[in-house]
Image (cartoon, grey):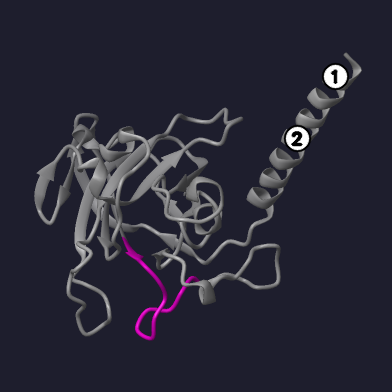
Amino acid sequence: MKRALFAFLTVLIGIAVVAGTALFVAKNGAEPPTLTATAAGTSQTSNGEVKHATLELSVFPNASATQAGPNIPASTTTLVANSQQWPFYSPSTSIQLPANALVTVTIHQYDTGGQIYNNWFAKPAGTVGNTMTVDGKDVTSVAPSNVAHTFTIHQYPDSNQPYMYVSVPLPAQADNAANQANGYPTPIDVTFSFMTGAPGNYVWNCEFPCGNGYVEFGGPMSQRGFMSGTVTVA
């Protein structure tokens, strides 16, 4: 009985240590410079006329001579890992959006991919009409075997602010896609729109297993500046 109780307590302590470490990193990780959405007048929506803003991102498989890696302060607990050639979002993973507005995002996708673990993330959700465009064509899903990354905004676990969830899959480049002069293939352009609500603070991350460690969700997957970041609605 004592041995079983000791084993149970050991497991609980282990879980607490892991959770505490993750919380510390999340709260103390260095933030790259903020990328603010560009005002684009107003748009007519089902909620009437609202502010409209646009945001442009790119996803690169690695840093190169033509595309520098993430700009993250090196004097904090955050690991600066450009030398490890991790995939990353550019120009920043710290994003600011206007409140109560229609936001249109375009992501230029340069990376290869494969099979996503959860098919839910192969479909856009939280976007206008739960749809997106891929190179100008309206789509409602991506083949689960052909996902490169996702862009997924969600709440903090203990959030008491307005609900917000947006997720889009990014189709993968072909393994044999020819590189252009910049060292990357012609990008796959994904565009989608969604509504923001009242001001709040959110997080976002990639849900495709493109990292290392446990089931490939370590490394860049949890690293701000690479495959995860923050969204401020203000």
Q: Which residues are magenta?
A: 57-71
Query: With respect to residue 11, does 68 lie above or below?
Result: below
Question: Where residue 178 appears, x then y in whole percent?
Answer: 17, 75
Residue 61 painted magenta: yes
Amino acid type of the residue tagged 1 in the rendering = Leu
Question: Where residue 12 appears, x then y in whole percent?
Answer: 77, 28
Q: Earlier in the sequence, mark 1 or mark 2?
A: 1
**179 to the left or right of 216:** left
| SS at mark 1 in the image | helix
In this orientation, does residue 206 appear?
yes
Question: Where residue 29 appears, x then y in whole percent?
Answer: 64, 57
In the rendered image, the quadrant that contains the N terminus is: top right
Q: Is the residue under label 2 in contact with that under label 1 (CB below 8 Å)?
A: no
Q: Nearer the viewer, residue 231 or 219?
A: 219
**96 to the left or right of 187:** right
> Which residue corresponds to the image point at 36% horizontal and 35% vertical from the top-left?
118
| SS at mark 2 in the image | helix
* Residue tagged 1: 5
The chief SS type of the magenta part is loop
Cα separation, mark 1 vs mark 2, equals 17 Å
> Which residue corresponds to the image point at 25% horizontal and 45% vertical from the top-left?
145
Q: Nearer the viewer, residue 185 or 37?
A: 185
* Residue tagged 2: 16
> Which residue corresponds to the image point at 39% horizontal and 47% vertical from the top-left?
208
**198 to the left or right of 59:** right
